[in-house]
Amino acid sequence: MSPKRTVAQLAVAQAFGQTFAGMILATTALVGTMLASDKSLATLPHALGWVSVAACAIPASQLMRRLGRRAGFMIGALIGIVGALIAAYGIYIGSFWTFAAGTITLGGFNAINLLYRFAAAETAPPGWRAKAISYVLAGSLVAGIIGPMIATHTKDAFAVPFAGTYLTLVALPVLMILTLAFTPLAPPAAAATRRAGRSLAEIARQPKFIVAVLAGMFGWAVMSLMMTATPLAMIDCGFHFSDAAFVVQWHILGMYAPSFFTGWLIGRFGLSRIMLLGALAQFGCVAAALAGIEVWNFWLANVLVGVGWNFLFVTGTALLTETHTADERAKVQGFNDFVIFGVVATTAFTSGWVQNNFGWETVNWSVIPLILAVIAAALWIGSKRPAPAPAE
């Protein structure tokens, strides 16, 4: 089983999954605004989707442990099909809560889809893990190119706006299943080898674990607060949906384009320095957003928050793989994603509430404490890790 072949095919499947996610990202808040009688609830379906991700994180990891990565990912794709159909039906009949039920179902799909990075890390030898994680995320770059574009062109395919977008989503999990059918993945471990390992409390006391979770949690939280509010803020400023879709497209490019070199940067400069760079990029996002409300301000802010997220998510994931054994993998990965996406669920809803009640500037000021916490964590773990060996 060639690790590079497996990583490449995981990257293709991830690309389909993230195109799916990119279309949802570009449209959910706007569909919520269209369907909600109380506009302060516009981002509730988006938030409920993340609540579902958090709730499904531990069961998804345990599903993988019992059935293996291939079967688990295929089940996730089937959940995505069901969720897209429910959401499309909710839009068609004009039901806010049916649409919300669809986003909750799609949270199960996303919870499983987020485990591709761990599958890549398990396939790769230890010295290549950061690159493998990074390359699988790089497969999502296609999402930044075609996801919002598909959303824009399918928005008015039916009489009810966005119904066609969610029906189009159904095709993407089908392509994921076809890709996974030919991806060489290890079978699930035999029951006799599934030992409990250390307790989660013992694992969680490690400095590496604390910083890994913090980087992922706050990196996602800052991005969620900023990105969820962006389409709403742009529409409030008088821009069109096509402008918002353009910004979302570049945001997703910012998220995934760095993946072609993030792994190399980690190998060259070390995890803590790239983690610090990610936090500084997100700080630059705030500076760009507060500088004005032109399209270029939204564009630059969303590119920078995406780049920062990439550096923090890859470094956090790579650091997490250093904290557990194979026997402890499922519970550590599940708990990590439960914590991260529980926070993301909170920020996704809070973002819409803050935007609607206090405005775009307040959204930006609210993320600064989170960024400062990541900077402190990066400096702390950097003081405990040896410097990387010079690249040959």
Image: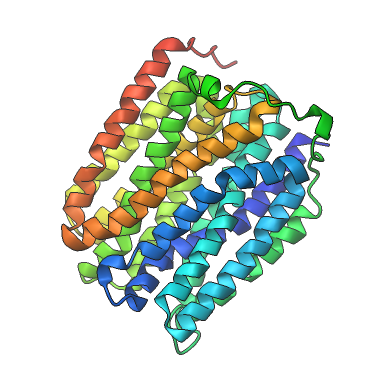
Image check: 310 left or right of 377?
right
Q: Is residue 304 above or below residue 146?
A: above
Q: Can you name the residue that lies furthest to the bottom here?
A: 159
Q: Looking at the rendering, in which quadrant would you find the C terminus?
A: top right
Front-most of residues 146 and 90 = 90
Percent coordinates x, y for residue 318 in the rendering: 55, 29
Q: What colouring style does the render use?
A: rainbow
Residue 169 image-quadrant placement = bottom right
Q: Is residue 145 visible?
A: no
- For the image, the number of numbered tags is 0
Image check: 140 left or right of 159?
right
Percent coordinates x, y for residue 236 in the rendering: 21, 68
Percent coordinates x, y for residue 171 in the rendering: 65, 70
Residue drawn at 24 percent across, 38 percent down: 368
Residue drawn at 47 percent across, 28 percent down: 212
Front-most of residues 241 and 224 = 224
Front-most of residues 173 and 200 = 200
Q: Is residue 286 above or below residue 175?
A: above
Residue 222 image-quadrant placement = top left
Q: Is residue 347 visible?
A: yes
Q: Is residue 249 above or below residue 134?
A: below
Percent coordinates x, y for residue 190 in the rendering: 83, 34
Image check: 369 left or right of 137?
left
Residue drawn at 24 percent across, 35 percent down: 369
Q: Looking at the rendering, in which quadrant would you find the N terminus?
A: top right
Residue drawn at 67 percent across, 53 percent down: 13
Residue 42 image-quadrant placement = bottom left
